[in-house]
Image (spheres, helix red, strand yellow):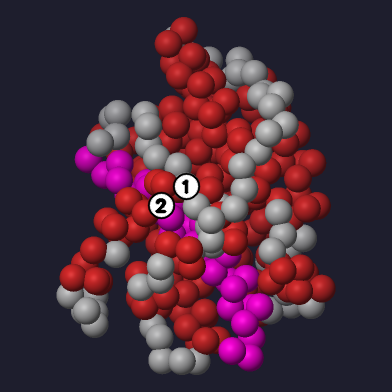
Amino acid sequence: MKNENLYNYILGIADNSLILGQRMGELCGHGPTLETDIACTNISLDLFGQVRSYFQYAAKIAGDGRTEDDIAMLRKEREYKNVLLAEQPNTNFAYTIARHFLFDVYHFSFLNELQKSSDLTLSAIANKCIKEVSYHERFSSDWVKRLGDGTEESNQKMQEAINDLWTYTDELFHQTEADKVMVEDGVGVDVTKLKDNYYKSVGELLNKARLNTPESKWFQKGGKIGIHTEHLGYLLADLQYMQRTYPNMEW
């Protein structure tokens, strides 16, 4: 493939939204309130909308006859490049919010920089998506504060979720070989430069929510190179079911 690094770079961005969108979609009909249920479902739809733009571009670059649906639905588990954070399950509502918050803060900063990409398609996608992600960040941040500064029980559950998911945050700032090439070409975002502001912003909000910032320096990694937790296989079984059961089906 002529532009293999660009193709893999796009997948690295898109798979985060694909997998997180699937996770949020699992809450449809299961939110704590009707308003929150609808909000989570809309966030899922936002993320899937972003994914379509990325995968349409990836299919064009691949030039091998595959469609956006093929790329989204017909890869094997080790071929997905999402960070481990995105695939963590909805253990309870606190985990859902904590996972989304820890990703949203990164996602907004990332898209803000991707708008400066020399690749006009990626720049346009980022410019379109950042308004949605700005809302996502406000939504998850508000809920972190609401639960953290709520009852003793909600504070405890929120703190537990933050503590457990913290181990997946450092991977957001790891670079794959495709990432490094794209940064050198002026196409990609140097995520290593986002790290300090990320942890500063997250820490400030956790403090407002009466939550402690975890001090653990032990982090998990591997998702960006296809080494995932056991959770992704189950998620893909649901995500890919229709496409694999009825081959060549079109929406």
Instruction: Give left or right: position of 108 versus 23.
Output: right
Q: Which segment is the magenta one?
A: 1-29
**Residue 218 is drawn in which quadrant?**
top right
The reply to whether the C-beta atoms of the residues labelled 1 and 2 are less than 8 Å apart is: yes
Residue 85 image point, x, y percent: 53, 45
Residue at 45% in and 19% down = 157
Circle 2 packing at 10 Å, graded few (<14), some (14-19), many (20+), is many
Instruction: Give left or right: position of 118 versus 206.
Output: right
Q: Considering the image in quadrants, where does the C terminus appear?
A: bottom left
Residue at 82% in and 73% down = 184
Residue 87 image point, x, y percent: 45, 48
Q: Main secondary structure of the magenta part?
A: helix
Q: Amino acid at mark 2?
A: Leu
Kindly identify which residue carries mark 1: 229
* SS label for mark 1: loop
Instruction: Give left or right: position of 73 versus 154.
Output: left
Residue at 64% in and 86% down = 3
* SS label for mark 2: helix
Residue 7 image point, x, y percent: 58, 78
Residue 229 visible at all: yes
Reply above or below: 44 against 146.
Answer: below
Residues under labels 1 and 2: Cα distance?
6 Å
Residue 122 image point, x, y percent: 62, 73
Reply above or below: 61 against 74.
Answer: below
Q: Amino acid at mark 1?
A: Thr
**115 within the magenta span:** no
The dot on residue 232 is 2
